[in-house]
Every structure is written in structure tokens, then in C-alpha cells.
Image (cartoon, rainbow, N blue to C red):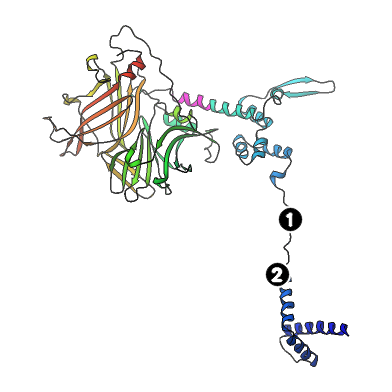
Amino acid sequence: MALPARRGRGAMAVGRGRALRGGGGASSPGDRNRSRSFAARPREHFEAVNAGIKSLYLTPPMKPKCCLRLESMPPEMLLKIFSYLDAVSLLCVGCVNKHFYHLANDNGIWLKIYSNCFQPKKTIWATNSEQTETVSLGYAALHNRKPGYWKKEYIFKQIAAVKTRVMQLVKPVDPYTGLPCRNREAIKAFGLSWIIVLKDKNGKEYVIKKAKLSFKDTSVTIRWHSMNWPCLDILSTLKLFGVTPLFPDQSRPSSKDGPHRRSLIAEYHLANLTESSVALGADKLVQLFNLNPGLLIGLWKEKNEIAFVTASLHYYQLLERSILGSATVEYTLPPNKPVLDDIDPEYGLHNYDLHLDMHGGSWTFLCGTFKNLFCRKDDIENGYLRLTVISLKDNTKHLPLIGTVGFSWETDVFKGNVKDCYVMDVSLLDENEKPFWCFSAPAYIRPSSRACSLFDYMGHMYTTDYADSEGKVCFELVWLEETKEYFIVNLVLYISIKKVNKWYGTNY
């Protein structure tokens, strides 16, 4: 009796399915009986339909086919693949993970790269009882070296070769400035660029690479601008680095993502920037602040946030400072070896030459050379040697500043000019025409407290200056309203006696 009932329920389900699919047509008495049977058990019918739907849509997906991963390949096969890479690609592969790093340090691969680059292939003959085979000269040392030995040798040899090439470029010296006259070519040959790294109070770093360079006679001005500067309030330090590709190649441009070296040039503290720095001036949009040595930060007036950063770098020892330092320690200039002179009673007090540049962005206001500057022993006071370049009393040497003095700035969206701000480049040479005191720094012209006492000029007096641990520069200028220009009527350099004694071996 039970079996026919089960067959009846199955038949009713099939019949109901046909009725639903057919959507119409005459029904037989058996169909009506089945409908009444479903109506009598609605919950059982709902559960059966729901289970069918789930079985259709919740079927487990097919397992993806197994794919071969590069990391899972045997080391021998990976070494064979790596052997076809060049040095730059091999270094990049070594940064993927630890396994790749150890494989990419293989001495066999690097010895091949080293031999192809720096020495011709040489072989020796080794006689065996069964055969004669060719053995590479470097093969004997291959297994006696630690992993990565030939990699380091290749890198050091590449750096030394590039340094030799660059030093040949900087040998020719300009007789007026005493500085290398082919700095731009040397910078290009080395692939040298500059970046700034901003660090916040939590230790997070922000690297700003996008920069615009402006070359002058004795300096280069670098301006960084970005649309995504971090908030000034959270910043603690700013570091200036020189960046060079690890393997500069003149035949092709250096890759931005390739291996590079950093050399720390200067570090600046940004905490309480507006209070700890010197305000140089402002226009409608930005205000300029100076941090020694040679850093200029432009802040938006309304938001008090960074608009741009500018660094002025003097050519003196610029390549050494930008290349030979490390990522954490600045390059230290080699000490000068004094040449003693027992004959000259005023040794170290005369035959100085000064090259002076005053510029603001793309415009140069003054570029001049002043020869045979000197100081008497009686003019030494307060620990400074006084070198008078332009005297108030000698109006034949008074010089005008060409154009309207101002510092031009530019970002991705805005640009402007801050009046009476400029960059001062000073190159003072000793009697042997060697750089004695050199710097490049932002400065500004401000009204003087003393009235003009010169009969040749009818105008207001202004002053501008610079000072560091080695000396001071003091200007006095007169503004001529009729011609709308500044005249330099007094220029004096004060050199620290400690620096003079250390340089010449004297005892003033």
C-alpha cells in the first residue's frame, strides 16, 4: 500500500511540472487530484522547490587549474633565467624577496658581468689525462669568495670609473670664479639630480622628486613643487639629497625606478618654521622663509601650507657633496694644507679676488668680478679681517642693479614675484686663485636706519647682508626714484680671523 502512494506523489510532482511548463491546456481528472494533493500539503511543496533551487545555484565551483609560480621553480632554473639579465635588472630582481636576493648574489653571474665590462676574456689551458679543457682565469676564485663578492666588486668598479670620468670634466677651471667651468656637463654625465625628503613627527617620510633646475655662473637653483605637500604642522625635518644612478650610462637615459645612491647634503628642522626661520618677504599669495644653508620655503598665506621649496647650491665641491656622502652622513670637505710663508709680513691679508652674482629666478641683477682685495693689519678688529670691495667715498665704483629686484616663483597652477628678494652667490679666491669662501644663499633688501649722506644721490638708503660662521657680507644701496633702480654704494666683506689663520697657518 505504501509503494503506490510514493509513485503517486512522484507522478503528481512530474505532472505539476508539466502543467507549469505548458502554461495551459485541458486537465485530466488525474491532474486535478494531484493539484488537490499539493494544496493539502503546501509546506512540503515549498521545501521541495526551495531545495531544488539551492541545488542549482549553490553547486561548488570548479577548482582552478594549477599554475606554475616563478618562486616555486627549482633554483637551478631560476639561476639560468637570471643569467640573461643585465646588472640593473639583476639588482631589481634581488629586491623581490629573500630567495631571489640570495640567488641574484650568485658569484657566477656577477663574475660574467664583471668580466664582460672591465676586462677581456682570458683563458688558461689545463691538461687532463683524458682531455684538454679551457678554464677561465676567474673560475679559480669563484668558489673561494663569499656570495655577492663579485657583485660588490662590479658596483665599486663602476662607481670608480664614473668618478674618474666626471673628475676629468671638472678639471678645467674658470679664471674668474676659480670653479669648474663644465659643471653642467659633469652633472649630466653623472645623471645627478636632487630630491628632498620630508619627515613627520611619526617617522613617516614623503619624497619630493619633481624639480626644476636653473643654472647660473657659480650656482644651481633647484625648485620643488607638488600638488600633494604634507601638512606643515606635522613635519619635523627636511633632508636634501643628491641622487645618482648606481650604473650611469651615457648611451641611454637613467631609469627612475632603477637602483640609485643617495648622498646627504643638508638637514633642516621644520618645527615652528615661522618662528625659527627668517622671513624674507611676501607677495599676494606666498610668504618666503629662509633656513641656512641656502633653503627657501614658500608658504601659502591663507592656509599656511607649503607652496614650494627652493635650494641654492654653490658649485664649490657640489659634485663631491652630492655624490660622495652617504644616506645618513654628509660629505666632509678635506682640510686645507697651509703653505707657510716667513717672508711676507702680511701673508694672508691681500690678493683676494671676489666674484659676485645677484639673481632671482631667471633674471640676473649683478654679475661682477673684483680683483686684488686687501686688508691692513690695523683693519683687523673684533675677530674679522675687513675687505672693502666698494667704498662710499669712491663713486666711480658704485654699481647699479639691472632690472627690478625680486624673486620669481612658480608652481603647477600659480606664479609670482616677491619684491626685493634675491639669491646672493659669493666666490672669494685666495692669492693662489683657489676658492677660499663660497656660498649661495637667499637674501632680501630692507630699508636702512641711517639717512643718505651722499651728495651724488637723492634717494633712500637700503641694506642687505649675509652672515655665517666664516664671515659676513654687508651691502648699502640707494634707491633712485627717477630711474627706478638700486645703486650699490658700499660693499664690505668681513672674514673670520680664525678661518684666515687656519687656511694660511698664520697667527693674527
Q: Residue 493 at x, y = what percent?
A: 27, 24
Q: Residue 434 at x, y = what percent?
A: 36, 19
Residue 165 lies in magenta, yes or no?
A: yes
User: What residue appears at the point 38 percent right and 44 percent down from the top-left corner?
Assistant: 308
Picture quadrant of residue 184: top left
User: What residue appears at the point 24 percent right and 34 percent down from the top-left corner?
Assistant: 401
Mark 1: amino acid: Lys
**Mark 2: which secondary structure?**
helix
Q: Main secondary structure of the magenta part?
A: helix
Q: Residue 400 at x, y = what percent?
A: 22, 32
Mark 2: amino acid: Tyr
Local crowd size for mark 1, using a 10 Å CA cut-off: few (<14), some (14–19), many (≥20): few
Q: Residue beneath label 1, please?
A: 65
**Relative horizontal placement of residue 274, taking residue 170 as reference (left or right):** left
State the residue lying farthest toward the left.
455
Question: Mark 1 and mark 2: span between their CA atoms?
Answer: 22 Å
Q: Quadrant of the C terminus?
A: top left
Magenta residues, as a range? 161-171
| Closer to us: 370 or 174 | 370
**Relative horizontal placement of residue 463, taking residue 123 as reference (left or right):** left
Residue 169 lies in magenta, yes or no?
A: yes
Q: Residue beneath label 2, please?
A: 57
- From this view, report whether residue 163 is shown above or below residue 295: above
Foreground tag (1 vs 2) = 2
Q: Can the viewer see residue 471?
A: yes
**Mark 1: which secondary structure?**
loop
| Closer to us: 1 or 55 | 1
Q: In which quarter of the image is the N terminus?
A: bottom right
- From this view, report whether residue 91 is shown above or below residue 498: below
Picture quadrant of residue 457: top left
**How many numbered circles does the render carry?**
2
